[in-house]
Amino acid sequence: MRFCRFLFKDRVWWGMLEDEGVQPLSAPPYYRIVREGDPLPLEEVKLLAPAEPSKIVCLGLNYADHAREMGVELPKEPVIFLKPPSSVVGPGDKIILPAVSRRVDYEAELAIIIGREAYEIPKERAFDYIFGYTCANDVTARDLQMKDVQWVRSKSFNTFCPLGPWIETELDPADLSIQLKQNGEIKQKSTTANLIFKVPEIVEFISSIMTLLPGDVILTGTPAGVGPVRPGDVLEVSIEGIGNLTNPVDKKD
């Protein structure tokens, strides 16, 4: 099943995608599915980011080819960092390049959406706590990442976490094609089979450190091929079984 958040007549809704359009829901679907009103045509609503996370936990260097292109050794355990909820934007929203950075990169990623409160969850039970998956772009100010000791500043600017277009709940994340196009040209192309740490291991590791709440987002890492973006670019993240997340790029006024 596919679930989304959308704007319709100045009200934000949760919705369930059906053949006839979008069925409005009265609550986030990871709590319960309660229909409200009649279905709406998809073309009459504006899709928003399909999650309102309390936190976004990200994995760095989780594809071997990306670790090699960054010139670092493969990690022996997951390398994690946080992006703030204020960095989230939805499909079609602009990625705004900050004036303080001279090199901002795209990073296509599979995003996990947590559906139940999760703490100290063994990998064998990880899927019981995952609601679904969506596309993500872990936008990064690469020059600031290299300059700073840690990655907070480079990963945290407003608009640096596009998510969408919806959450797919019926999906096996083990071997999904993932790619990013920049202005129609393929720049990243891989499969989630190449993840160093797989989805169950990721949930086990992160939940051993912190409590994950419904709606929290985990970014699973990006494959090789990251590169710079410029004002006027259009970035499209595509993941098999989910769909396409498209965002234009602009500069800060």
Image: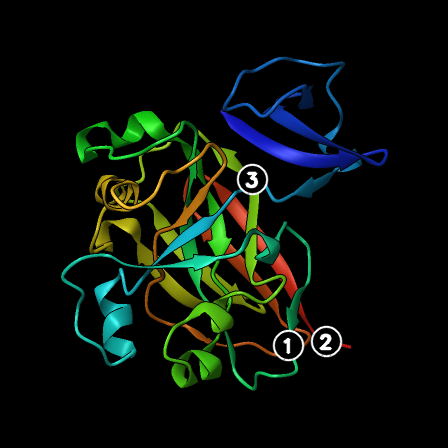
Pick the residue in front: 88 or 92: 88
Q: Earlier in the sequence, mark 1 or mark 3?
A: 3
Type of the residue with mark 1: Pro
SS of the residue at dot 1?
Answer: loop
Residue identified by numbered label 1: 98
Report crowding for label 2: few under 14, some 14 to 19, many 20 or more residues within 10 A (C-alpha). Answer: few
Q: How far apart are the alpha carbons under marks 1 and 2?
A: 6 Å
Mark closest to the chain's N terminus, 1 or 2: 1
Q: Residues within 10 Å of mark 3 (few under 14, many from 20)?
A: many
**Amino acid bearing label 2:** Lys
Q: Residue at x 62, y 61 (%)?
A: 159
Residue 82 makes an appearance in the image:
yes
- Which of the numbered marks, if any, corresponds to residue 51? 3
Q: Classify residue 51 as left or right of residue 73.
A: right
Question: Which one is in front, 121 or 103?
Answer: 121
- Residue 107: x and y in percent read 44, 65
Mark 2 and mark 3 residues within 8 Å of each other at the beta carbon: no
Determine whether 163 is above or below 228 in the image: above
Residue 121 sits above or below residue 217 on the image: above
Tell me where residue 119 appears, x and y as whole percent: 30, 34
Give the quarter of the figure containing the C terminus. Answer: bottom right
The residue at the far front in this view is 210
Identify the residue under disc 2: 252
Q: Is disc 1 in contact with disc 2, using a CB cutoff of under 8 Å? A: yes
**What residue is rendered at 20% in x and 35% in y?**
123
Give the mark nearest the N terminus, 2 or 3: 3
Q: What is the tally of numbered marks visible in this picture?
A: 3
